Amino acid sequence: MSNRPGYYALLLLAVGGCKSSPPPAPPPDSGAQVSAPVAPSTTPVPTPDPNAALSINESVHAITVARGQAFTVSLPANITTPYKWIPATNLAEAGIELLKDEYQTNPSPDCANCAGVGGRRMMTFRSNLPGEHVLSLKYQSITNSTEAPAETYQATVTVRD
């Protein structure tokens, strides 16, 4: 029993040493500052706008949008040739509306003023008809409509309600 007082002293020392204490304050003339813990951010993460236009290129053949959401199909083109991307299907029957059709040049940095530089045809569509629709486009000669298209593009457009 003579070891009991030493045991209690050791136990008190061990338990007392486990107590957490605030970090020491810096010396008054050190210029250091002690900062309070930072609370987690409560800023909400923005949700995607269901009305924002979805941008698609020629490698995409399945498009899913919300009813009324615009989507833009971007296809390689060259305005200096007699070819233009045009719908190959009746858009009204497919429940698809063409909102905008524009051409954007895409010159390389070393050829900013070159003639005949290719670009992209940007066609923006929208559908208010839920379900699956086929969007077919063709790169057709504007001088000879009986000529076979130089290229075609087709995508399945799924419109969610």
Image (cartoon, rainbow, N blue to C red):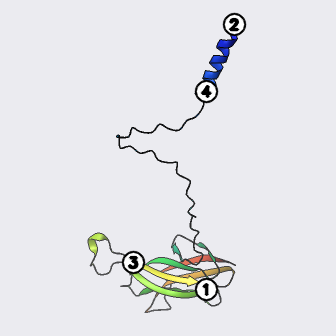
> Are there few (<14), some (14-19), or many (20+) residues within 10 Å of tag 2?
few
Q: Secondary structure at mark 1?
A: loop
What residue appears at the point 59 percent right and 81 percent down from the top-left corner? 135
Image quarter in which the N terminus is found: top right
Q: Which residue is mark 4?
A: 16
Q: Which mark is residue 2?
A: 2
Residue 23 in the image, given as x and y percentages of width and height: 50, 38
Q: Nearer the viewer, mark 1 or mark 2?
A: 2
Quarter occupied by residue 118 = bottom left
The alpha-carbon separation of the residues under discs 2 and 3 comes to: 95 Å
The alpha-carbon separation of the residues under discs 1 and 2 comes to: 94 Å
Q: Nearer the viewer, residue 149 or 39?
A: 39
Q: Which mark is residue 119?
A: 3
Q: Nearer the viewer, residue 16 or 125?
A: 16
Q: Secondary structure at mark 4?
A: helix
Residue 32 in the image, given as x and y percentages of width and height: 38, 43
Horizontal placement of 12 versus 21: left or right?
A: right
Q: Amino acid at mark 3?
A: Gly
> Are there few (<14), some (14-19), or many (20+) residues within 10 Å of tag 1?
many
How many marks overall? 4
Q: Which residue is mark 1?
A: 96
> Are there few (<14), some (14-19), or many (20+) residues within 10 Å of tag 3?
some
Q: Amino acid at mark 1?
A: Ile
Q: Amino acid at mark 4?
A: Gly
Looking at the image, tell me whether mark 2 or mark 3 is earlier in sequence order.
Answer: 2
Q: Nearer the viewer, mark 3 or mark 4?
A: 4
The alpha-carbon separation of the residues under discs 3 and 1 comes to: 25 Å
CB within 8 Å, label 4 to label 2 = no
Horizontal placement of 76 versus 71: left or right?
A: left
Quarter occupied by residue 4 = top right
Residue 141 in the image, given as x and y percentages of width and height: 45, 88
